[in-house]
Image: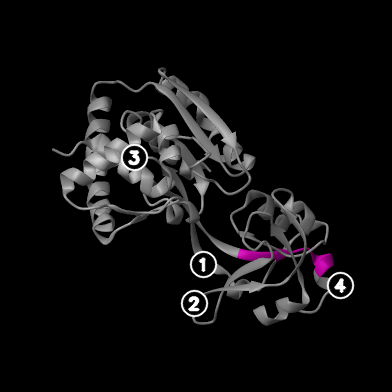
Amino acid sequence: MLKVEQLKIFIALTELGTMTAVANSYQVSVMAVSKKISMLEKQLGQPLFSRTRRSFTLTQFGQDFKLHALQVIAQLDTLESWVDEQNGHISGTVRVLCQAPEMIHETIIPWLDKFLNTYPGLNVELDVKESVIDLNTDDYDIFWGVSDYLGDQFSNLKRRTLWTCDYGLFASPNYLRLHPILNSPDDLDMHTVIGYLHNKPADIVIFQTDTGELAHKTIQNRIKSVTGLVEMACSGLGIINAGNDDVKIQRAIQEEKLVPVLSEYWYKNVSTYVYYHQVKGEQAKVRAFIDYFIAQKKYW
């Protein structure tokens, strides 16, 4: 009979790529992981992976099996979460990672006191990583305010939408006075972008074509950073590519320090998500956190 623990270790290996990473995640030995995978394959009667010395690649059977295993785990986690909540067993520590400190201040901190009073058995740890998140090294329960790249990279994560905005271009009036007029994305070739350091590449600009298709353009870039992009744009150092719902950008526009550029070519309806694991025993506290703070969206 198949066991849920086997399925979860199998899924973890498909996401993390090495038995060592899975062993560290589950706090067991590499030998234990290897035995569970071998036993699972023996029970199934077919190999799940094509193995080399350095990597594991899913067989076609393994790919199909993974899809069914994910469905089973999701259903079981939902059931276990419901039982925990019915019994009032919501306790422990919720570890939350955001990609910008402003996100914590604007969407979590104002309601944190009431949340802790509502769930006296829960503790909260809030952290910030202004770079690409990697589940191999970033051990958190919740990834708050992240774009779709994390879900694309780790399909075992679940997600809910936090908000949707338009991804636009912004520059200071002084910068625009000193540079050629922007009438279309082709004119960007004569301009400079302030790049986000961990974008690949950092000098890329995202926009939408006349037909509504997503497009990318690489333009001149002299500055790459993980922070201060709005402030640098206000000082005239270049154009920034960012969400139009950013509080700093909205404030800068009101103060006439920034102006929207090429708004008819902005990338529309870009979603930001909260991602979380499908892990036994953690679903109740994770669900409590996510449900509570998403309920405050109307105040953000």
Q: Amino acid type of disc 1?
A: Lys
Q: CA distance from mark 4 to mark 3?
A: 52 Å
- Residue 184 visible (yes or no): no
Q: CA distance from mark 2 to mark 3?
A: 35 Å
Going by the image, does 264 lie left or right of 229? left
Question: Which residue of the protein is positioned furthest toward the front in this rendering?
Answer: 53
Question: Which residue of the protein is positioned furthest toward the top in this rendering?
Answer: 120
Q: Is residue 172 magenta?
A: yes
- Neighbor class of circle 2 (other Cα within 10 Å; few <14, some 14-19, many 20+) is few
**Residue placed most toward the observer, 84 or 67:** 67
Start-end of magenta stretch: 168-175
The residue indicated by pointer 2 is: 212
Q: Mark 3 or mark 1: name the one nearer the start of the chain.
A: 1
The residue indicated by pointer 3 is: 278
Q: Amino acid type of disc 3?
A: Gln
Going by the image, does 12 lie left or right of 236? left
- Residue 95 visible (yes or no): yes
- Quarter residue 249 falls in: bottom right
The residue indicated by pointer 1 is: 268
Residue occupying image coordinates x 59% and y 44%: 99
Q: Secondary structure at mark 4?
A: loop
Q: Mark 4 or mark 3: name the one nearer the start of the chain.
A: 4
Residue occupying image coordinates x 49% and y 77%: 212
Q: How is the image coloured?
A: one colour
Q: Mark 2 or mark 3: name the one nearer the start of the chain.
A: 2
Contact (Cβ within 8 Å) of mark 1 with mark 2 = yes
Q: Secondary structure at mark 3?
A: loop
Which disc number belongs to residue 70?
none
